Image (cartoon, coloured by chain):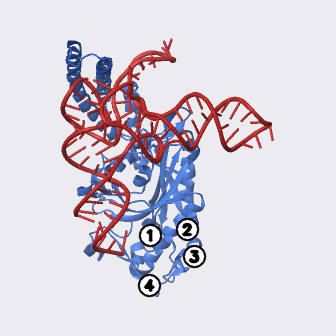
Amino acid sequence: MLDQRLVRENPNLIARELSRRGVKVDLTPLQKIAQQQRDIEEERSNLQAEGNLIGKTVGQKIKSGIDPKSDAIAELRIQGNKIKKKVSLLEEQEKSISEKLKEKLLSFPNIPSENCPDGNSEENNQEKWCWGNPRKEENLLEHWEIADRLNLFDTERSTKIAQSRFVTLLNQGARLERALINFMLDLHTEKGYKEVLPPVLVNTASLIGSGQLPKFAEESFRCSEDDLWLTPTAEVPLTSLHREEIIPSDQLPLRYVAYSPCFRREAGSYGRDTRGLIRLHQFNKVELYWFVHPEESKTAHIQLTKDAEAVLQKLELPYRVIELCTGDLGFSASRTFDLEVWLPGAKTFREISSCSICDDFQARRSSIRVKEGKTTRLIHTLNGSGLAVGRTMAALLENGQQSDGSIAIPKALVPYFGSSHLHPKCNN
RNA sequence: GGAGAGGUGGCUGAGUGGUCGAAAGCGAACGACUCGAAAUCGUUUGAUGGUUAAUACUGUCCGUGGGUUCGAAUCCCACCCUCUCCGCCA
């Protein structure tokens, strides 16, 4: 959420910055509303002060022995009633204006960082650096073809259980998924991340807090009878872990790692990535999340990205780092590095992690602050996948292909998986 | 699902109509004592909005939303949440 004060005092700055994202808004009407809200608030609070004084006076007089039924007190009561009527009228106006204002404020995306390159689409994203040597042989299979041969998962039967875009992992496939989750959690906790296993049903306030609502309601699954939603990413429960808290500064940074299944409706992606593990309504993800002091968030962002990269490096998966341009930024982010893993079968790089800094955007929505001397200050939040598990499996399968049809498991994963290869023969 | 209890500041917890943002304790900060620390003593210590150059002034907040009243943490109504016991259950 944007700062209400900034809307009042510097709406041009907001309009300019949002236009970098391709969001064209005229903020003058909103500024007017904000101004109006403040004017009414002032008038109302002055009246309330007057009313409070009358209340106190009556109390004092009665205490000092004046007859409650005397004319003097009756006069005060009449005055009090007059004020009350005025106040409730103003309150009504103020309420509807504040609601309008809040609704608008919640619908604006974050202001991009000054470091975020300008651009209006994917094409303006910048490649920052690469790691590893991508395999470029011609005859490599795509991951679902491999999975078919090795009997690692079943998508067709999953439609009996649920719908399309769900997967049921089988045999070594299920085992590999489990190994990956454990491997990732261990890797991050060894670096000092605190492990969290949050609820996957989250309430509306949590989704507003991290920025999924009110704008992206159609992306999440909802349990409408309970004010609960299936979490689209662990970023949501992790943000709410400290919602409406003031964190002592010596506790920062707080670094969390959480495994969670993630649920997305993938509205508007009909026909895209219909095969395999790339785009599902339910997938597993290990998420990294930082609460940091505002002064330290920029360096933290680099570190978070490195921590996500470490997973790919340990798994010996070639990847590149892409900095998103302003036009491609997510709603809450002010700057984002995407990690894209190389899929030699599909002959393409695929997003496997998105490492974002949100500045105080989520902190303001969620009211998460740090004590600084006598006052408080909004903290900064960062998040990144470390990593999306299903896509990691896809990458492992495609990158590990051997000429004999087996799949080599990276050394770091062997202790978790329990075997150095996936063999077509030992698949059941 | 049934029965009961309860939601007050960072925490524990008092407060059942009148200067109550709220006792007390704990915690925290500062000071004194000390070579230093502990203990002790003293002082300070909620959040958020507005006006202001600032001192300062002022609004709101006792789960949430309504209502009664000149005045509500306190009374009334609705809702939400938490806890305990019973039932069911991984």
Question: Where residue A111 sits: x, y (%)?
Answer: 42, 38
**In the rendered image, which quarter is residue A334 located in?**
top left
Chain B shade: red
Residue mark closest to the camera, 3 vs 4 = 3
Structural distance between the alpha carbons of marks 1 and 2: 12 Å
Q: Earlier in the sequence, mark 1 or mark 2?
A: 2
- Does label 2 lie on the same chain as label 1? yes
Q: Earlier in the sequence, mark 2 or mark 3?
A: 2
| Crowd band around label 4 with a 10 angstrom C-alpha radius: few (<14), some (14–19), many (20+) | some
| Crowd band around label 1 with a 10 angstrom C-alpha radius: few (<14), some (14–19), many (20+) | many
Q: Is residue A167 visible?
A: yes
Of A24 and A284, the residue lying toward us: A284
Above or below — where is A123 with respect to B60? below
Structural distance between the alpha carbons of marks 2 and 3: 13 Å
Q: Earlier in the sequence, mark 4 or mark 1?
A: 1
Structural distance between the alpha carbons of marks 1 and 3: 20 Å
Q: Which chain is blue?
A: A
- Does label 1 lie on the same chain as label 4? yes
| Crowd band around label 2 with a 10 angstrom C-alpha radius: few (<14), some (14–19), many (20+) | some
Residue mark closest to the camera, 4 vs 1 = 4
Above or below — where is A293 with respect to A180? above
- Does label 2 lie on the same chain as label 4? yes
